């Protein structure tokens, strides 16, 4: 450590917290395809979107040209509760692996919600409050987003209704209770409290749910209750915009010591963490200033990038939301209950999907037993119990570091540690007891989901 003088933890000063979000789409030559109205097949207008989302968030969602957007002072002040977050040099992991690679991770778990989700939760809650709304509705998979949003809504005095994927609701009672402690109403999804929930249960009795199901229910409640709007924790352009604080801080910390990464790795479910982490680096790549190898890591049980189709699809199982052009497994795809972590969404961010389609980054899928092996190894040497989602990135970071050991290359690897795993102990218990198994959907399984893709002009059936 004395040789390179880079500390274990690189902290920015409070004054160095970003004051602007970076809009990656401004530097994209091929912009993400627009959301479509499922009824007309035409691009969704701001007026149509404002019935679902907050007005200011609609503007951010549709803005493909403004590179930097001011972060309101109230949000900056809230960020100071837990930002800047540390960029950590994983010296102990490097030593344990015996690799010449240099490994860094951006740790986003140093807040009560335990994850990066709070970066967008406070922004979306702020704009809802500013608009004079009574409350918001949302879905949550593993519970990180619901927990973060419950904190933000409590802080601003907003009502919150959360539809939590049933399998997570049952497996993660403590995450659920944190939400309730902050005042949120939490309902397992699919439920009998909404029309779309009743329909899904009738068609799939005993289903353990999916994010697509929960989104449908949350949207229904938002549009049928005056004074409410729907907010989403991933996938949307606005969410990637808010999460750019992760990448901006990461780059600023690396620049302090003249460090340039060779490989940047992030877990990928809907795209919030990955998109936020890579934003400024991808911007440099798009502008032709620098080049990086960027890797998206997804679960083998929900492989939208690696085995999905780039097509317009519904964002929800109930098929009531706008159509998005993304890498998708079909809105009817429901991950196996065997899958222990988050990253359960059937599709991927339209922004990241376009970048992947255009060859600016790569993707890989990993099986969950190997993910938890990496999580255990990381926990034992780095002292942080990682979230299962984050551990997908840890798995590939370790694999890349071991490749460097074989070749002798001294590559610099940066990955996103999205949060902690203290509410994921049922999954860790299954792994420790040898009860965890892997499930990889067959081509036939995936074909069922993809068979329900909507008919859109110019899109293959």
Image: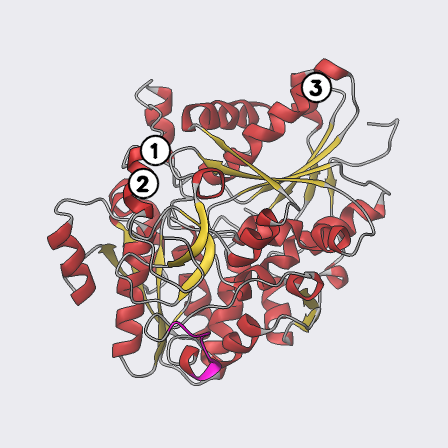
Frontmost residue, 396 versus 33: 33
The answer to whether residue 64 is above or below residue 380 is: below
Element marked by disc 1:
helix
Residue denoted by label 2: 447
Q: Residue at x 67, y 54 (%)?
A: 279
Report if the CB atoms under discs 2 and 1 are less than 8 Å apart: yes
Q: Is residue 42 magenta?
A: yes
Residue denoted by label 1: 443
Element marked by disc 2:
helix
Element marked by disc 3:
helix
Q: How is the image coloured?
A: secondary structure
Q: Residue at x 15, y 48 (%)?
A: 204
Q: Which residues are magenta?
A: 41-47
Residue 217 in picture, x, y percent from top left: 26, 63
Frontmost residue, 455 versus 108: 455
Please report whichever mark, 1 or 3, sits nearer to the chain's N-terminal start: 3
Residue 421 in picture, x, y percent from top left: 45, 38
The answer to whether residue 307 is above or below residue 191 is: above
Q: Badge 3: few (under 14), some or many (20 or more) residues near its Cα, within 10 Å?
A: few
């Amino acid at each position: 450590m004395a040789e390179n003088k880079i500390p274990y933890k690189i902290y920015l000063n409070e004054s160095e917290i970003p004051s602007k979000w970076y809009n990656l789409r401004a530097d994209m030559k091929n912009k993400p395809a627009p959301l479509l109205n499922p009824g007309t097949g035409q691009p969704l207008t701001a007026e149509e979107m404002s019935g679902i989302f907050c007005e200011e968030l609609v503007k951010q969602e549709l803005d493909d040209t403004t590179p930097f957007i001011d972060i309101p002072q109230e949000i900056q002040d809230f960020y100071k509760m837990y930002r800047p977050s540390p960029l950590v040099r994983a010296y102990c992991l490097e030593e344990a692996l015996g690799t010449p690679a240099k490994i860094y991770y951006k740790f986003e778990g140093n807040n009560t919600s335990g994850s990066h989700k709070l970066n967008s939760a406070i922004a979306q809650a702020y704009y809802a409050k500013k608009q004079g709304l009574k409350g918001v509705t949302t879905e949550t998979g593993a519970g990180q987003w619901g927990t973060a949003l419950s904190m933000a809504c409590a802080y601003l005095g907003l009502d919150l209704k959360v539809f939590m994927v049933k399998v997570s609701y049952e497996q993660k009672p403590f995450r659920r209770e944190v939400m309730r402690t902050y005042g949120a109403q939490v309902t397992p999804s699919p439920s009998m409290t909404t029309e779309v929930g009743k329909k899904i249960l009738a068609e799939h009795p005993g289903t353990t749910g999916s994010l697509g199901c929960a989104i449908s229910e949350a949207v229904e409640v938002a549009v049928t209750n005056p004074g409410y709007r729907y907010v989403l924790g991933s996938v949307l352009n606005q969410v990637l915009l808010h999460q750019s604080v992760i990448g901006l801080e990461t780059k600023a910390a690396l620049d302090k010591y003249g460090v340039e990464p060779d490989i940047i790795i992030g877990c990928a479910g809907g795209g919030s963490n990955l998109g936020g982490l890579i934003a400024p680096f991808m911007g440099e790549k798009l502008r032709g200033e620098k080049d990086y190898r960027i890797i998206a890591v997804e679960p083998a049980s929900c492989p939208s990038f690696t085995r999905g189709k780039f097509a317009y699809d519904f964002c929800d199982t109930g098929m009531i939301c706008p159509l998005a052009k993304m890498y998708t497994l079909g809105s009817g795809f429901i991950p196996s209950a065997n899958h222990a972590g988050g990253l359960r969404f059937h599709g991927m961010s339209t922004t990241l999907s376009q970048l992947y389609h255009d060859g600016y980054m790569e993707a890989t899928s990993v099986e969950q037993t190997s993910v938890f092996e990496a999580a255990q190894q990381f926990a034992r040497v780095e002292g942080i119990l990682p979230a299962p989602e984050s551990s997908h990135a840890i798995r590939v970071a370790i694999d890349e570091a071991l490749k460097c050991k074989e070749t002798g290359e001294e590559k610099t690897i940066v990955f996103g540690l999205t949060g902690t795993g203290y509410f994921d102990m049922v999954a860790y218990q299954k792994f420790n007891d040898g009860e965890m198994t892997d499930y990889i959907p067959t081509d036939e399984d995936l074909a069922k989901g993809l068979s329900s893709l909507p008919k859109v002009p110019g899109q293959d059936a």
